[in-house]
Image: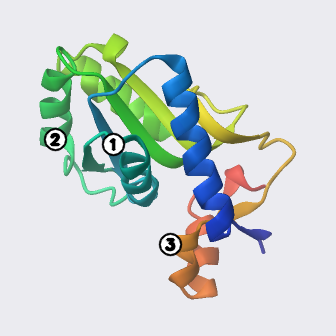
Amino acid sequence: MPTLTPVDQPEFLTAVHYVAARIRESGWEPGFIIGIGRGGLTPAVYLSHATGVPMLSVDHSSHLPDFAAELLVKLAAMSGTARLLFVDDINDSGTTITHIKAAIHEAGGDLANIRFATLIDNVVSAERVDYRFRTIDRTVNKDWFVFPWEQLSPVDKVIEDSGVVPERLA
């Protein structure tokens, strides 16, 4: 059974404010915040409120073939003239970021206008994020982080979700 580590609401709010401050300090001003469904939606809403930057969303977690493809093509077109900040809860393996970057690139988007922010960033991930609150090393830390919105799920569902990619926690 995985070690379930709750991220409580005060820590979540601290994380959002921290990331918002890092964005401001960087001088890179996004035109839109893009919440990556499902885990990045709530952080993106909060980050949108904290920064005053409008929010859009794109699905990734449903794993329905091509469900988000049309939206990613639209976002690729927008990236020619607008800066887009994609937000997720955790950069674990990097597969979500890799997927989004590839889709934007294949649709002719400008990756120079794309950045990524997460609450938790795995330093051994295949991808890097531009803004983060906390870093972990999955070779050492195998905890399954349970964010406030996930705490509404029954524990057995949280455990089931943690097992989707077992090597991540092995």
**What residue did someone put label 2 on?**
71
Residue drawn at x 35%, y 48% is 35
Residue 137 position, x and y percent, is 79, 39
The outermost residue toward the right is 140
Please tell me which residue lies in front, 139 or 12. Answer: 12
CA separation, marks 1 and 2?
Answer: 22 Å
Q: Please, what is the three-letter code of the amino acid marked with disc 1?
A: Gly
Q: Is residue 147 visible?
A: yes
The part of the image, by quadrant, that contains residue 73 is top left
The answer to which of marks 3 and 1 sits earlier in the sequence is 1
- Name the quarter where the C terminus is drawn: bottom right
Q: Which mark is residue 52?
A: 1
Way the structure is coloured: rainbow
The part of the image, by quadrant, that contains residue 82 is top left
The answer to which of marks 1 and 2 sits earlier in the sequence is 1
CA separation, marks 3 and 1?
Answer: 22 Å
Residue 117 position, x and y percent, is 50, 36
Q: Are marks 3 and 1 in contact (CB under 8 Å)?
A: no
The part of the image, by quadrant, that contains residue 10 is bottom right
Q: Which mark is residue 149?
A: 3
Q: Please, what is the three-letter code of the amino acid marked with disc 3?
A: Trp
| Count of marks overlaid on the render | 3
> Element under label 2?
helix
Q: Compared to 22, does 8 lie above or below?
A: below
Q: Are marks 1 and 2 in contact (CB under 8 Å)?
A: no
CA separation, marks 2 and 3?
Answer: 24 Å
| Left or right: 24, with 101 as reference point | right
Q: Is residue 92 visible?
A: no
| Left or right: 92, with 27 as reference point | right
Q: Compared to 23, does 20 lie above or below?
A: below
Residue drawn at x 59%, y 76% is 158
